[in-house]
Amino acid sequence: MTTSYQLKRVDFIFKNENDWEDVLSKSISKPPQELINELISSELKGRGGAGFPTGLKWKLSSEAVDDTKYVICNADEGEPGTFKDREILSRVPFKVLTAMAVCGHVIGSKEGYIYLRGEYFFLQPELNKAISEFEYYCKEINLDFKIRIFMGSGAYICGEETALFESMEGKRGEPRNKPPYPSSYGYMGKPTVINNVETLAHTFTIFKYGAKRFYDLGVQYSRGSKLFSVSGDTPKPGIYELELGMSLADFVDEFGDGDTKAVQVGGASGFLVPRKRFNETAIGFQGKLTGISLPTGGSMMLFNSSRSMFNVIDNYLEFFREESCGQCTPCRVGCQQLLSGIKAVKRGEKNAQYLDKLMRLAETMQYTAKCGLGQSVANSFSSIVENFREEMIY
Amino acid sequence: MTKKIKISINGVSVEIEPGTTILDAALQAGVIIPTLCYHKDLCVAGNCRVCVIEVAGQKRLAVACATPCEEGMEILTNSLKVRNSRKHIIELLLSEHNADCTRCYKNGNCELQYLASEFKIMTQDFIQLAPLKKYTIDMFSPSIVKDDSKCIRCQRCVRTCVELQGVNALTVAHKGDHMKITTFFEKAMSDVVCTNCGQCINHCPTGALVEKNYIEEVWDAIADKTKHVIVQTAPAVRVGLGEELGFEPGTRVTGKMVAALKRLGFDAVMDTDFTADLTIMEEGTELLTRLKKVLVDHDPEVKLPMATSCSPGWIKYIEHMFPNYLDHLSTCKSPQQMFGALAKTYYAKARNLDPDKIVSVSIMPCTAKKFEAARPEMHDSGYRDVDYVLTTRELAIMIKQAGIDFMKLEDMHYDRLMGESTGAGVIFGATGGVMEAALRTAYELVTGREVPFENLNIAPVRGMEGVKEASIIIENPLKEWAFLEGVELKCAVAHGLVNAGKVMEAIRSGQASYHFIEFMACPGGCLGGGGQPIPTSPEIRRKRAEAIYAEDAGMPIRKSHQNPEIIKIYKDFLDHPNSEKSHHLLHTHYTSRERF
Amino acid sequence: MNPVSDLIKNLADQHGRSRHNLLPILQGVVEQEKYLSEFSMTEIARELDLPAAEVYGTATFYSFLEHKKMGRYIIRICKTITCSMKGKNQVLLAIEDMLKINVGETTPDGTFSLLQTNCLGFCHKAPAMLINNEVFTDLTPEKVRDILSTYMKKKGASHDN
């Protein structure tokens, strides 16, 4: 039983991309349906964190009827602890560009955008060079597909897909009501596929090697490999491609410093797992594995016993208090309440039972916030208070 | 016909049209879901999250206002999860809100207060965030007070300012805990493109946006025995005031209102309808003169279409947005300001009063009138023409303060000299009313016959469509108007500034060829004004409009030029329309302003 | 004509004058001017025929679109957890000490502004900071002093970034 959840390193994403021209021309010679089927059978799920099946996403947009459709690569990598997308775009940009063009072929779109976070401005020149080269080849093979970079300007929430559209439309990056969904009403109200950088890079792998190679990695419901951004108290911080489904205990064995007290999985909006749960926690998307399973954008922050969990949650909550778009009540006011609440408890101005009230508030935030990010901002709070209650009080 | 879909709400199954939101479906099923950022006049925002409901099988709650029903949905509006969440959200809003209710102008008419009361939020569990924030109160505008400490960021005001009015004075700025409703560079409302229309006040659920009130000043004036305090009431007030005092929307309370004003202690109660009739005489004459100058004299200095100038919100809007078109505005002052100028001249003389001792008060459905009265050019009587402008809401407050049982009042009549009105004056309160009144008089002046509409009701300019058009072909005019023979007089009516903007764009691009246009800043015209009772909705405005037209239909005289007091004022004081004296007292000029 | 007006006109020519071109234009002005003044925002509104309030509301949403006067070099030091764990505060103190300003301030000569920012995405090389668009990682107080010295020498040069 344990064997399938072991940590296995994989090397697909950063493996050479020299054959991108080949992959592109072969892929676009195939009918869209075939490519969609390939993606669906690979069971690739979005690598940004939400984990929506990629094949289904492309399928829905391909079925939408409209002359104008868009392919958007979400490179607004703002989740604390995540830095894999920048690495992909700087090391293997052609994989992403190829995947975007193939997506364009599948859904019937001639325009692609890369929404690049403002913090990664310095990537622009190299990326633009890659785009020119790419477009030159597209012209050669008579593929009508253009890619442009759209720069963000420092707003975490723009990683939420509908907020990203709003931002590209020149507005405040405030998430929209859903439905309608991007597949029918995305950027400029047009059918849009929006994928995370890493997701697109994986589709390259799938188009190159076929769905099976990908599917054979990982475990049920969590197929394939995934990039993990490892940081915090670790002797080897960096980016690692690992098979999904590993147990957190194995992960800590590999990356911990021998004194790992807890791991924050999925960034500030993810969950904190304490040492006692390492064994029962698997890293994947859904379904019960050995214990709980965590969706993840791949951020893994390790904390050793010298770290105060109060400081950790204080830092996260301050982040969310600032980065909430501010439009919906539970996220805007909820973040302020959680933050002032833990400080008040720490100072002794509120008693320990106040944490229980805040836990219930965290639950409400999860149920009622407008967007996916708003619904998850309280995750870290809940898991930290649940597991390190005494650190919140004393 | 589309096939209906079946859903269940709290276990009761209902059939509804596809595309219906959960909120509307619940309403149809007799289930009330509380809302806050939702408003019938505005697009759906889904921000406040008060209307959350549970859909069976979903972990997360959905918002009723923004979620369309789907076949087979099982909706729970009162589950434990819903109740707890909703209560939390109200508590959160309260924690960010300066809930000093007893000291709030909106105490008793606040949607947040109402929700807090409904959900019995008795404790203050969460930390009060309001005192920690640097909230500001903007009191610089003569019309609007904006108190950020009361704001719950529902964005109804912003949507109003943008969608309904196309003014964009208000915006959402910053994000996270700093997110706020503000203006360009957080300037005072008086320093930006704000038209003072007050629609933001009408749509604000709390006390964050209220009118600047002059209640105490008016009480002081009334108490001052050396002053002669007169009051005028605008047409739309009589169909709105009742809502504040226990009547259903659409109730006409003209006589009770006059009686109440007398009990409050005003020395004379007169009617803005009188100067509405006077406006028709002046504006109608101006229109015919312009037509002659353009059609016969080909005078390039004279501009058509001519636009009405009764609505001060519209005036400030055009001054900001289309400053090159100010020549198109009628030079006529609004009825309020005509009244003001005459009060301290004509009325003072007739009653043998020292104009310096006259305090001129007006009751308006409007907040922009407060700004208008304060315009520097409005001193043609030699004094400030109108001293205090109160909204319908402020009058209701005074009536309550005075302990008057409004419902039991016997009807009374306006005082003479400037208190007589016609049906034409009354309909100024509804969109299309000025146009209809003007056509009733102008057509008759030109042809000697009544307008060719049944019962004088010019139906094409009535109703709530944003932009309305009408035209009349002039046949067999009287000799002096012979040049108008066969001319098709093309008119348009726009209400709500966003519609005004559309018409102006059409003029600018040359697509529109009107002769005369009525513009009103507020949706529905003055009856939907920014000083009218809160709440407002399309339904409420429709009822007020019905009341206006009922009032008109019941008047013995329905054409401005037949108003005996109008005939008298021209005989005794003004000579004739557009005379030198009327130009001095009743006409004005406009100021070009910055749009950015 | 005012050089900022020219800049805005050129940016609008380059990107277009629709609403969806607003962000690139705002970014273009910030790139050059380091911040958006009231004048800049008014001019952008005029050029794009947008309400000025909308421009302000949009600009203030984005942390990198400053609307207060900034120095020529904007230092943004990452304050998110990993950087904090790896000694961000010491680095910050070193900068404050060297430039004699606090977070949120600009040096009197208008060369440096010091800000904190949210996760820069260099958690594995923490602590990290940006100076304008250039990234510096694995910072220590010594290292940051060297970096700033280099920038101080660049001060007079016409081309920075």
Image (cartoon, coloured by chain):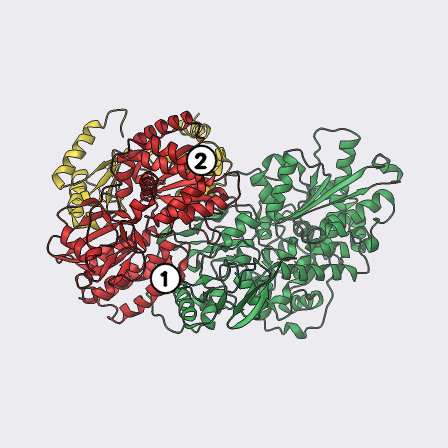
Residue B192, position in %: x, y?
Answer: 49, 44
Q: Which chain is in green here?
A: B
In the image, what residue occupies the spot 49% across and 42% down? A188
Residue B558, position in %: x, y?
Answer: 80, 56
Decide: is C68 above or below B261.
above
Q: Quadrant of the N terminus of chain B?
A: bottom right
The residue where tag 1 is placed is A365
The residue where tag 2 is placed is A111
Q: Amino acid at mark 2?
A: Glu
Q: Which mark is residue B431?
A: none
- The single residue placed furthest to the left in the displayed view is A258
Residue B293 in sight in this render: yes
Give the alpha-carbon distance from disc 2 to disc 1, as whole Å.
Answer: 37 Å
Decide: is A105 above or below B174.
above
Quarter-of-image position of residue C142: top left
Residue B192 in sight in this render: no
Q: Which chain is in yellow here?
A: C
Q: Secondary structure at mark 1?
A: helix
**Chain label for disc 1:** A
Quarter-of-image position of residue B389: bottom right
**Could you say which is closer to the camera, residue A148 or residue A158?**
A148
